[in-house]
Amino acid sequence: NKPLVYITRKIPNEIVEPFRELFEFRMWEEAEEPVPRDRLIKEMEQADALLCLLTETIDRELLESAVNLKIVANMAVGYDNIDVNTARDKGITVTNTPDVLTNTTADLTFALLMAAARKIVEGVNFIKKDKWEHWSPFLLAGSDIHHKTIGIVGMGRIGKAVAKRAKGFDMEVLYHNRSRNLEAEQELQAIYTDFDKLLERSDFIVSLVPLTNETKHMFDRTSFQKMKSRAIFINVSRGQVVDETALYHALESNEIAAAGLDVFEKEPIRADHPLLELDNVVCLPHIGSASIETRVRMLELCLENILLLFNGEEPKTPV
Ligand code: GLV
Ligand code: GLV
């Protein structure tokens, strides 16, 4: 009997095909919509492996209903959607997808930073709304990026890849992290800075911290008050590291200049979300790692991790 792998979304058959000799697959048959929770719990009565997305909450209740489950392969680098402690207690391996998405996510981070600084989306909408009457000296004049100071909060793999891009723009790179990253300091001249000083000194503040009990709402009212009035805040990690109400007020009262957001406290946001009323915010629907190449590699890495585990080997990327 082949082990049964449950995949929580419809994914392209070509990706699964090479693994069919070894595994039986069952898939939620919708590409856009997540599997309903009661259906997922039912599927867990039989599954030996689970390939899930960040739209699924893998909590104690779910893990306890999963009598045969040996591995949860999360198609994301972040794994705040998984109760890792309960999984460990039950001997269930958890894997994520680091490395394969690092450069793709750093590219998007920089795209969002540049869009917010140079009012790219405002400019596009300006033309679409037929408001372009004349060229003017300060029409849609934004902030420079080159030679400015970027403060990276969370200096992991993605943080380092963002720092590398920032060096290409002759930026000064400050960072804050739970522990020092000597590689980033030596290779990229990143300067370790305490959180408050980083907020005070940076022109661009970029959140790349994973969501944990310690990082929840770490960007709050006081944090935004410490930032420069021309500061631009970028979040590409998890929405819940930000107090969104505090961010809204900081932007609305011009306490800070702009924001670029790929993630939100509660996703998806709807078109009536207060942040969307503001011209100085660029919002994206959580697409940090969304290139076709990278999304394929993330799925393949999930399947490789499952394969290795059932071969009795160590998965490539356990959390
Ligand atoms: C996406 O947010 C991820 O964690 O990979
Ligand atoms: C997390 O894995 C990161 O690379 O920042």
Image (spheres, helix red, strand yellow):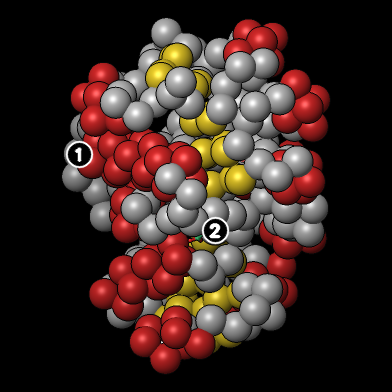
Residue type at tag 2: Leu
The answer to whether residue 16 is above or below residue 248 is: above
Instruction: Tell which of 239 and 9 is nearer to you.
Output: 9
- Could you say where residue 247 lies in the image, as x and y percent from the top left? 67, 46
- Could you say where residue 12 lies in the image, as x and y percent from the top left? 28, 21
The answer to whether residue 202 is above or below residue 209 is: below
The quarter of the picture where residue 127 lies is top left
- Could you say where residue 107 lies in the image, as x and y percent from the top left? 31, 54
Pointer 2 residue Cβ closer than 8 Å to ligand 2 = yes
Q: Would you say 200 lies left or right of 215 here?
A: left
Q: Which mark is residue 208?
A: 2
Residue type at tag 1: His
What residue is shown at x 78% (from left), y 59% (from top)? 214
What is the C-alpha distance between the residues marked 2 and 1?
39 Å
- Residue 197 appearing in the image: no
The quarter of the picture where residue 264 lies is top right
The answer to whether residue 81 is above or below residue 235 is: above
- Residue 101 appearing in the image: yes
Residue identified by numbered label 1: 134
